[in-house]
Image: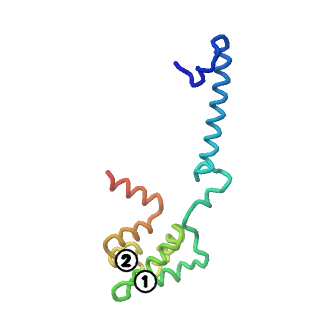
Amino acid sequence: MSWPCDSVINQDHKTKEKSICFQKASFKMSTVHEILCKLSLEGDHSTPPSAYGSVKAYTNFDAERDALNIETAIKTKGVDEVTIVNILTNRSNAQRQDIAFAYQRRTKKELASALKSALSGHLETVILGLLKTPAQYDASELKASM
């Protein structure tokens, strides 16, 4: 087996030099690891994981108001897709779940089924995906890929 530092290793001190070589390589690898950790969101533990998400909770959130606005958008002639998109894409997943619950309480219908009948095409696919929890979405994507 050839060691990276063999060219500078004196045959009499090969074991000692290999140890030094490993220490240098280990130091270089730890330095590389530290640099990669700084570049990688997963490796930098100085920032809490909650700071990484791109969708933040909507500050003036009111599930009842959002459910009412979505209901109105669905009932509008031609469906007000812009309102539906603006509401659902600017809320966190937990807030979208609250909106779906408020919509069901208000109309006695599931929000997903109401949107499925009101929307079509890629927009329908995206909006219905937004209404799923992360686990539900992952499971449906895995099932679809099989």
The residue lying toward the viewer, choosing from 62 and 12, is 12
Q: Position of residue 77 (x, y in %)?
A: 34, 89
- Indicate the position of residue 92 as horizontal and vertical percent values: 54, 69
Mark 2, other Cα within 10 Å: few <14 / some 14–19 / many ≥20: some
Q: Spatial distance from mark 1 to mark 2, Cα to Cα?
A: 9 Å
- Which quarter of the picture shows residue 128? bottom left
Nearer the observer, 2 or 86: 2
Please give the residue where the numbered disc 1 appears in the rendered image. Answer: 71
Residue 116 screen position, x and y as percent: 34, 73
Q: Residues within 10 Å of mark 1 (few under 14, many from 20)?
A: many
For the residues bearing labels 1 and 2, Cβ distance under 8 angstroms: yes
Give residue 35's mark: none
Q: Quadrant of residue 78?
A: bottom left
User: Is 122 drawn above or below residue 48 in the view shown?
Assistant: below
Asked if residue 146 is positioned above or below residue 6 in the image, the reply reads below
**Could you say which is closer to the camera, residue 109 or residue 32?**
32
Amino acid type of the residue that numbered disc 1 sits on in the rendered structure = Glu
User: Hey, what amino acid is under mark 2?
Assistant: Ala
Residue at x-position 44% and y-position 65% = 132
Q: Circle 2 sits in a helix, a strand or a loop, which is it?
A: helix
Q: Residue furthest top?
A: 12
Seen in the picture, residue 51 relative to 23 is either above or below; the reply is below
Residue 114, label in figure: 2
Q: Is residue 94 above or below residue 49?
A: below
Residue 103 percent location from the top left of the image: 46, 78
The secondary structure type at the circle numbered 1 is helix
- Image colouring: rainbow
